[in-house]
Image (tube, grey):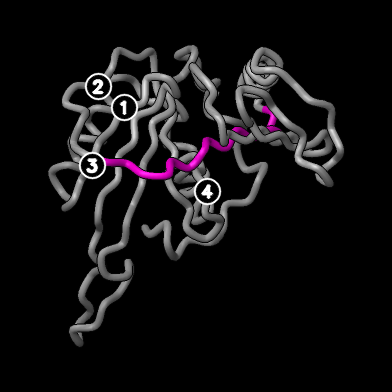
Amino acid sequence: MSALSAPSVRAGLFPPPSVPLRFTDGDRYEWQGAGNWLRVAGEWEPIVGEGDPDPVTDAEVHRALRAAVKLWDTRQRFVPAMPSRVSGRTLLVLPKLQGAAQYVHDHTLDQLVPLRDLVGAYSEDAALDIPGVLTEREAAGVISGIDAEHEGVHLRYDDSAGRVYVRYLREGDIGPMGEQVGWPPHAVCLHVFVLAATPVEA
């Protein structure tokens, strides 16, 4: 499966996988029919022209996402900020966590989307088998697998954002005529594990 060649993830396929432990500037909160917000300088600013909503606070976004997770409300989405860079192999041991939602870079949308939403762009049935929240052991297993199978793996833990960033290079496959298929050469992939406020999964 390639995030580079996948159809764009459509909003409303699944509810948010979890409530983030912490927010950071650049995060987006989207609520179909109510408006969209962008977190700037510690505050959630309405995105002009997208419903003209009122400003909201971290606590309000936290409560709304918690309700969306519990009620399987597919109208709401949390979109983590794209990191400007991920440098160094600075993470050796995962931080203690109750759980983490796995997001991946959708190159078509150029934003982070939950892994199960990306899989759901191919098969909704297959996506239902993907947990919204990974346990500490499951997250460690995914990261270990990436580290073992790919080149140029860079790991970073941002405590202030409550996120683990994993960036790596992935080569495309070689077809029967020696042509490049699937991923383009040296595709840069990004997984972001957003630490969850609670272990409860949608």
The label nearer to you, 4 versus 1, is: 1
Gap in angstroms between the C-alphas marked 4 and 1: 19 Å
Mark closer to the chain start, 3 or 4: 4
Neighbourhood count class around disc 1 (C-alpha, 10 Å): few under 14, some 14–19, many 20 upward = many
**Label whose residue precedes the other's in the sequence (2 or 1):** 2
Direction from residue 147 to residue 5 in the image, left or right? right
Measured in 3D between alpha carbons, the distance from the residue under mark 3 to the one under mark 4, in whole angstroms, is 19 Å
Q: Residue under circle 3?
A: 154
Q: Which residues are drawn in magenta?
A: 73-87
Horizontal relation, residue 190 to residue 26: left or right: left
The three-letter amino acid code for the residue at tag 4 is Gln
Q: Residues within 10 Å of mark 2 (few under 14, many from 20)?
A: some
Residue underneath mark 1: 157
Q: Which residue is identified by label 4?
A: 111
Which disc number belongs to residue 109? none
- Earlier in the chain: of badge 4 and badge 1, it is 4
In this rendering, which labeled residue sits more in front, label 2 or label 1?
1
What residue is disc 2 on?
Answer: 94
Q: Residue at the location (18% across, 36% down)? A: 89
